[in-house]
Image (spheres, helix red, strand yellow):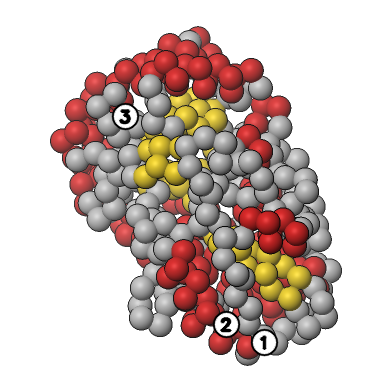
C-alpha cells in the first residue's frame, strides 16, 4: 500500500488478498477475492486457504450447473461454516465470487439476474449507485494529519468522511475534523462518522459519546468489542449518535441477534466479511425490512476484484447510505487489473458492466504479486 493504515484493532502497510481463480469446462474463468481477518471472522490467510482446499474444493467437484439459475442455487448452498463448525465467511466469499463471475461469463448472463433469483423485495437496479457516494476514510492519525487528509479529499469533492478512533487522542482528532469540515458539516452538505473497531470499554464509550453529543456525528462503528452486544442497547439509550455493527455482524445469525437485542441502528456490510455477494444482498434486504441503515464497507487493501463486486452490490441493493472501497491506486501501489477500479470525482462510481463482474484480471500481474506458489486443484 502507499502508506500504512492504522486503527484500534490493527495496523496494515501491505495488502494481503487471497485470490481464487475458477475455470469452467467451457473455458470461462472467474475470479474471487477475500481478506481474512482474525479479529473479524476468526480466519487467517492460512486457515482460509485450508478451508478452501479441504471443504470447498470437494463441493466444486460435484457442481454441475446447466443454467445460470441452477449455478446460483449451488453457489448459494455453500456453507458459512467449515466442517469443524468454525466460521469461514471470508473463505466462502472468495469461492462464491469466483463462481458467480465464472458462471455469469460462461452462460453469458448478467449479474442483474442474481437479484431476481433471490426473490427479495426491493433488490435490483438501479439500487443505490446513483445516489450513494464513496467515502473518505482517515486512519488513526494526529489531529494535524486528519485536517490535511480531509482537505485533500475535499479537493476531489468527497462529501462523506469516516475517522478512525479508539485511543487517547480521539477527542482532538474528531474536533479537528469538525473544524476542517466547518459549515459544510453543520449544514449537512458533508457527513462525519466514527469507527472505534471495538477499541472502547462500555464506560469509555459512554463518556466519549456524551462528550460528542452536540457534534454533528452520524454514527459510531463497532464501539465495543465483539461479544459485548448486550451492552449496546444501554449505549444507544445514552446518546443520540447511532451505532453501527461491523465485527459483530458476520453471519445471518449475528444479524438476527443484533435485531433481537435492538443493539444497532446501522449495519456495515462487507462482502469479504459476510461471505460473498449473495449473503451481503440478503443482509441488505433484511436491514431495509427492519428499518436499519446500511453502509457498504470494505477490507483495507482490496483489489479491483472486490471493488467490482462492491459496485454490483450497490447496483442491486437499494437504500445504501454510505460506501467504502474502490480506492484503487489512491491506496495500492499495484493491482491485478490493467485498469484498476477507482471512484471518481465527488466519490461517484460508474455502473458496473459485464461480462461477469466486469474486470479483466491479468495472469501476469497475479504472478508478479504472488508471494507463494499458487495452489492448483484439478476438478
Image marks 2 and 1: residues in contact by CB distance under 8 Å:
yes
Q: Residue at x 52, y 20 (%)?
A: 150
Of 205 and 329, nearer the camera is: 329
| SS of the residue under disc 3 | loop
Residue 239 against residue 23 in the figure, above or below: above
Q: Is residue 33 left or right of residue 164?
A: right
**Image-quadrant location for residue 27:** bottom right
Q: Is residue 232 left or right of residue 251?
A: left
Question: Which label lies toward us, 3 or 1?
Answer: 1
Tell me the residue that label 1 is attached to: 379
- Pinpoint residue 34: horizontal percent, then vertical percent: 54, 60
Numbered badge on residue 57 = 2
Tell me the residue that label 3 is attached to: 240
Question: Which label lies toward us, 2 or 3?
Answer: 2
The answer, for residue 6, to whether it is visible in the render is: yes
Q: Residue at x 40, y 26 (%)?
A: 141
| SS of the residue under disc 2 | helix
| SS of the residue under disc 1 | loop
**Image-quadrant location for residue 99:** bottom right
Numbered badge on residue 34 = none
Of 220 and 200, nearer the camera is: 200
Of 34 and 249, nearer the camera is: 34
Of 272 and 248, nearer the camera is: 272
Amino acid at each position: 500500500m502507499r502508506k500504512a493504515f492504522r486503527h484500534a484493532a490493527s495496523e496494515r502497510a501491505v495488502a494481503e488478498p487471497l485470490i481464487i481463480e475458477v475455470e469452467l469446462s467451457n473455458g470461462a474463468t472467474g475470479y474471487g477475492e477475500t481478506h481474512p481477518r482474525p479479529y473479524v471472522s476468526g480466519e487467517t490467510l492460512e486457515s482460509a486457504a485450508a478451508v478452501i482446499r479441504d471443504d470447498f474444493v470437494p463441493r466444486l467437484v460435484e457442481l454441475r450447473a446447466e443454467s445460470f439459475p441452477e449455478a446460483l442455487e449451488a453457489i448459494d448452498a455453500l456453507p458459512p461454516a467449515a466442517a469443524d463448525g468454525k466460521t469461514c465467511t471470508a473463505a466462502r466469499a472468495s469461492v462464491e465470487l469466483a463462481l458467480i463471475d465464472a458462471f455469469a461469463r460462461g452462460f453469458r448472463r448478467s449479474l442483474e439476474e442474481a437479484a431476481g433469483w433471490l426473490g427479495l423485495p426491493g433488490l435490483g437496479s438501479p439500487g443505490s449507485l446513483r445516489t450513494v457516494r464513496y467515502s473518505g476514510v482517515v486512519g488513526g492519525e494526529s489531529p494535524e494529519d486528519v485536517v490535511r487528509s480531509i482537505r485533500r479529499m475535499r479537493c476531489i469533492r468527497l462529501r462523506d468522511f469516516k475517522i478512525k478512533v479508539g485511543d487517547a487522542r480521539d477527542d482532538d482528532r474528531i474536533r479537528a475534523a469538525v473544524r476542517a469540515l466547518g459549515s459544510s458539516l453543520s449544514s449537512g452538505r458533508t457527513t462525519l462518522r466514527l469507527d472505534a473497531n471495538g477499541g472502547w470499554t462500555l464506560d469509555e464509550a459512554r463518556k466519549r459519546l456524551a462528550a460528542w453529543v452536540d457534534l454533528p456525528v452520524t454514527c459510531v462503528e463497532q464501539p465495543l468489542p465483539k461479544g459485548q452486544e448486550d451492552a449496546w442497547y444501554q449505549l444507544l439509550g445514552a446518546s443520540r449518535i447511532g451505532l453501527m455493527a461491523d465485527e459483530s455482524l458476520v453471519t445471518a445469525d449475528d444479524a438476527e441477534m443484533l435485531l433481537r437485542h435492538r443493539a444497532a441502528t446501522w449495519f456495515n456490510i462487507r462482502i469479504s466479511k459476510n461471505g460473498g455477494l449473495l449473503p451481503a444482498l440478503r443482509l441488505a434486504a433484511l436491514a431495509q425490512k427492519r428499518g436499519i441503515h446500511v453502509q457498504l464497507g470494505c477490507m483495507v487493501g482490496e483489489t479491483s476484484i472486490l471493488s467490482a463486486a462492491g459496485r454490483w452490490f450497490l447496483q442491486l441493493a437499494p437504500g445504501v447510505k454510505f460506501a467504502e472501497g474502490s480506492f484503487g491506486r489512491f491506496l495500492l501501489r499495484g493491482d491485478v487489473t490493467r485498469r484498476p477500479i477507482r471512484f471518481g470525482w465527488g466519490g461517484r462510481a460508474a455502473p458496473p458492466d459485464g461480462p461477469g463482474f466486469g474486470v479483466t484480471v491479468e495472469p501476469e500481474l497475479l504472478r508478479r504479486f504472488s508471494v507463494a506458489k499458487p495452489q492448483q486443484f484439478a476438478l
